[in-house]
Amino acid sequence: MTYENKKRAFVPPLTIERDMSPSEQSNTGEDDGLETSVDQAIAACGGDMRSTIRALIVANEYLESEVGELMKAVSHAYARGRFHSYSG
């Protein structure tokens, strides 16, 4: 799917009404941002849960590889004396 097709396929997040248990109701203040992000991720994938999970796994793998590269760069800089640790 091209970028243009993805832009056209984007659907704004849906608000799903459902009954919540008392424990879920007490957590809604903290989870509003998370729930909104979940809804946006699902909507970006056209409501397909498998596509959403696949996209999140790919994004996570990318971020893990970036962290690995940054850790190597810091490690090399430290070994060459270009990076000084904080000693209080």
Image: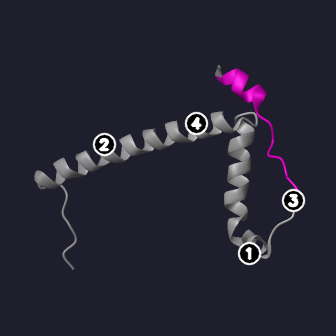
Q: Is residue 42 left or right of residue 17?
A: left
Q: Earlier in the sequence, mark 1 or mark 4?
A: 1
Residue named by callout 1: 23
Residue named by callout 2: 69
Task: Measuring from the top left, give residue 17's x and y in whole percent.
Answer: 88, 57
**Image quadrant in which the N terminus is located:** top right
Going by the numbered disc 1, the residue's amino acid type is Ser
Task: Measuring from the top left, give residue 16's x and y in whole percent.
Answer: 85, 53
Q: Is residue 18 left or right of residue 26?
A: right
- Separation of residues labelled 1 and 4 (CA atoms): 30 Å
User: Where 25 falls versus 13 (above or below)?
Assistant: below
Q: Identify which residue is drawn at 17% across, 47% down.
A: 76
Q: Name the foreground residue: 72 vs 15.
A: 15
- Separation of residues labelled 2 and 3 (CA atoms): 44 Å
Q: Which residues are magenta?
A: 3-18
Residue named by callout 3: 18
Residue named by callout 4: 55
